Image: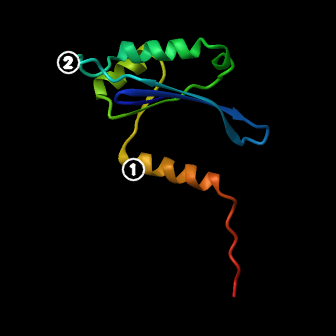
């Protein structure tokens, strides 16, 4: 589960026999507040997680991970406490690392010829 300020994205991956992963399903939930209502609370975010985790396709998920970006530290800590899961606060450096890993995994291995 990826929490990004006003959006929650849940991505479910299939893990192959050799450890390779492929995206099985993804859902995105918009949390843009009504006028004056402020940022989403930890309870609102957890409610989306609980709803999505109860769906048929989510029942076989054995390992949930929660990543937060642009979420107040107190909100991330509350999500972690309620779900009893660690929440990784996504820093810019970690975000760049994950983007690079994702890009590299999308391309075939590059081989170089020696001259």
Q: CA distance from mark 2 to mark 1?
A: 32 Å
Q: Give the image's coloring scheme.
A: rainbow
Specify which label sits upstream in the sequence, 2 or 1.
Answer: 2
85 left or right of 25 in image = left
Which residue is under mark 2? Answer: 36
Residue 98 in picture, x, y percent from top left? 50, 47
Q: Residue furthest right?
A: 17
Residue 93: image tag: 1
- Front residue of 64 and 5: 5
Q: Residue furthest front?
A: 35
76 over 44 or under it: above or below:
below
Q: Quick one: quadrant of the C terminus? A: bottom right
The part of the image, by quadrant, that contains residue 68 is: top left
Mark 2 or 1, which is nearer the eye? 2
111 over 44 or under it: above or below:
below
103 left or right of 69 in image = right
Q: Residue at x 76, y 37 (%)?
A: 16
């Amino acid at each position: 589960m990826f929490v990004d300020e006003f959006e929650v994205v849940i991505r479910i991956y299939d893990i192959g026999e050799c450890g390779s992963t492929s995206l099985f399903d993804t859902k995105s939930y918009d949390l843009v507040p009504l006028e004056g209502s402020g940022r989403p609370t930890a309870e609102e975010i957890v409610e989306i997680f609980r709803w999505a985790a109860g769906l048929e396709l989510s029942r076989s998920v054995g390992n949930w991970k929660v990543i937060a970006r642009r979420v107040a530290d107190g909100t991330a800590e509350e999500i972690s406490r309620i779900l009893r899961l660690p929440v990784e606060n996504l820093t810019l450096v970690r975000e760049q690392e994950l983007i690079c890993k994702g890009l590299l995994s999308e391309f075939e291995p590059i081989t170089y010829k020696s001259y």
